[in-house]
């Protein structure tokens, strides 16, 4: 597949998640897909990643990604995004606050056989938790 086709696959997965189309994981991610997160001892499987994404959207029903940069080379695609949403449901044990959040994220996606085979995701989760009031920001008591 071309680099442009690989970019389109990743863009489509992100857009389908924002629409709540969870079947897109089976269509666009390989059966042996793995998602790598900092601090996680083991990668998430395709089903575990789908459930983690669903939990995020349950906590932030209007959650959406704004894609700023897309870079591709060979079998890799890199996206730089801003994620936004309103905390209206429980998220990682935090009761809804009604607060709007905005944080940056970068994902590296490896494509194999026309499907996403692997991702490495980095997001400003410290900033997210500070916006939710779960972690104090510098200068707070």
Image (cartoon, rainbow, N blue to C red):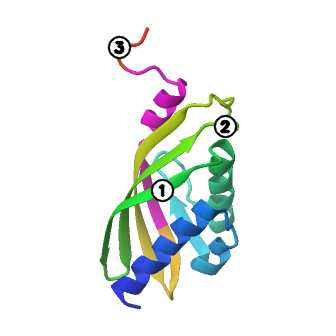
To which quarter of the image does residue 80 belong? bottom left
- Could you say which disc has been placed on residue 65 in the image? 1
- Between disc 3 and disc 2, whose residue precedes? 2
- Between disc 1 and disc 3, whose residue precedes? 1
- Between disc 2 and disc 1, whose residue precedes? 1
Looking at the figure, which quarter contains the N terminus? bottom left
To which quarter of the image does residue 60 belong? top right
- Badge 3: how crowded within 10 Å, few (<14), some, or many (20+)? few
Q: Check if mark 2's residue and mark 1's residue have beta carbons within 8 Å.
A: no
Q: Check if mark 1's residue and mark 3's residue have beta carbons within 8 Å.
A: no
Q: CA distance from mark 1 to mark 3?
A: 29 Å
- Badge 1: how crowded within 10 Å, few (<14), some, or many (20+)? some
Percent across and percent down for residue 59 are: 66, 42
Q: Disc 2 marks which residue?
A: 88
Q: CA distance from mark 3 to mark 2?
A: 27 Å
Say if 4 sits above or below 67 in the image.
below
Q: Select label 3 or label 2 by which is in front.
A: 2
Answer with left or right where residue 69 lies relative to residue 53: left
Say if 73 sits above or below 133 in the image.
below
Q: Is residue 126 magenta?
A: yes
Q: Residue at left 44%, top 8%?
A: 141
Q: Is residue 111 magenta?
A: no
The span shown in magenta is 119-137
Q: Secondary structure at mark 3?
A: loop
Q: Select label 1 or label 3 by which is in front.
A: 1
**Looking at this view, is 57 or 32 the one in front?**
57
Q: Disc 3 marks which residue?
A: 139
Percent across and percent down for residue 25 are: 63, 71
Q: Secondary structure at mark 2?
A: loop
Q: Secondary structure at mark 1?
A: strand
Percent across and percent down for residue 8 are: 44, 79
């Amino acid at each position: 597949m071309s680099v442009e086709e690989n970019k389109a696959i990743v863009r489509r997965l992100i857009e389908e998640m924002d629409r709540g189309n969870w079947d897109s994981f089976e269509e666009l991610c390989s059966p042996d897909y793995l998602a790598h997160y900092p601090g996680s001892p083991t990668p998430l499987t395709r089903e575990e990643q789908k459930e983690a994404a669903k939990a995020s959207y349950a906590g932030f029903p209007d959650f959406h990604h704004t894609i700023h940069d897309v870079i591709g080379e060979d079998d890799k695609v890199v996206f730089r995004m801003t994620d936004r949403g309103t905390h209206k449901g429980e998220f990682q044990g935090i009761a809804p606050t009604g607060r709007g959040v905005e944080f940056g994220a970068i994902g590296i996606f490896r494509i194999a056989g026309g499907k996403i085979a692997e991702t490495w995701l980095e997001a400003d989760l410290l900033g997210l938790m500070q916006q939710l009031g779960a972690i104090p920001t510098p200068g707070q008591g």
